Image (tube, rainbow, N blue to C red):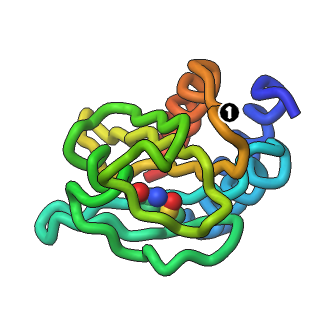
Amino acid sequence: MPFDVLKPKVNTILANDKEPVKQRLYEVCELLQTSLGYYDWVGFYFANHEQKTLHLEAFAGEPTDHIVIPFGKGICGQVAESNANFVVADVKAQNNYIACNMYVKAEIVVPLFKSGKNIGQIDIDSHTEDPFSVEDERFLEWINQQVAEIL
Ligand code: SME
């Protein structure tokens, strides 16, 4: 499903203030994971800046052991510190990478900013090699901006 078709669906989910934020985030994860064939796992991590840890708040796809990730560790932990998108075409080429399952070939992590502060991130794992383009980056940045507005 094209990004332009997904965007209004994301807005409808996020605007549903009858549901708790965590449920709405879960529904966004599920929408992306079921609508985009190369999005095999989709999750939102949020930062605890005092403990310097990331915490998995919502996800769709196979359950992961990595519910808490220290800043600096893995692709996610690096983005917590760099404040920059991290697109990994081939996870095997990364030294500082936390494997979630053996089928994952690529990953993209985009930071989520609220009032200019990096408070979390969206993380996508793919079983397809090198699937992410600059359009994915722009789409995921847009999603994070929409999420920031309901936090
Ligand atoms: N691969 C991530 C860990 C989280 S899982 O992808 C769900 C990383 O290296 O930070």
Q: Is mark 1 within 8 Å of ligand 1?
A: no
Q: Position of residue 72 (x, y in %)?
A: 21, 55
**Residue 48 shown left or right of residue 12 in the figure:** left
In the depicted structure, whether residue 146 falls above or below residue 91:
above
- Residue shown at 56%/59% (left/top)? 43
- Residue shown at 58%/49% (left/top)? 124
**Most foreground residue, 33 or 106:** 106
Q: How many marks?
A: 1
* Amino acid at pointer 1: Pro
Determine the secondary structure under disc 1: loop
Q: Is residue 18 visible?
A: no
Q: Residues within 10 Å of mark 1 (few under 14, many from 20)?
A: some
Q: Mark 1 highlights which residue?
A: 131
In the depicted structure, whether residue 4 falls above or below residue 129:
above
**Most foreground residue, 120 or 10:** 120
**Most foreground residue, 64 or 6:** 64
Query: Image quadrant of residue 142?
Result: top right
- Residue shown at 58%/44% (left/top)? 106
Farthest residue to the top: give it. Answer: 134
In the depicted structure, whether residue 10 falls above or below residue 46:
above
Q: Quadrant of the N terminus?
A: top right
- Residue shown at 72%/55% (left/top)? 40
**Residue 144 shown left or right of residue 131 in the figure:** left
Query: Image quadrant of residue 116?
Result: top left
Q: Position of residue 120 (x, y in %)?
A: 36, 52
Q: Position of residue 151 (x, y in %)?
A: 43, 53
Q: Is residue 61 visible?
A: yes
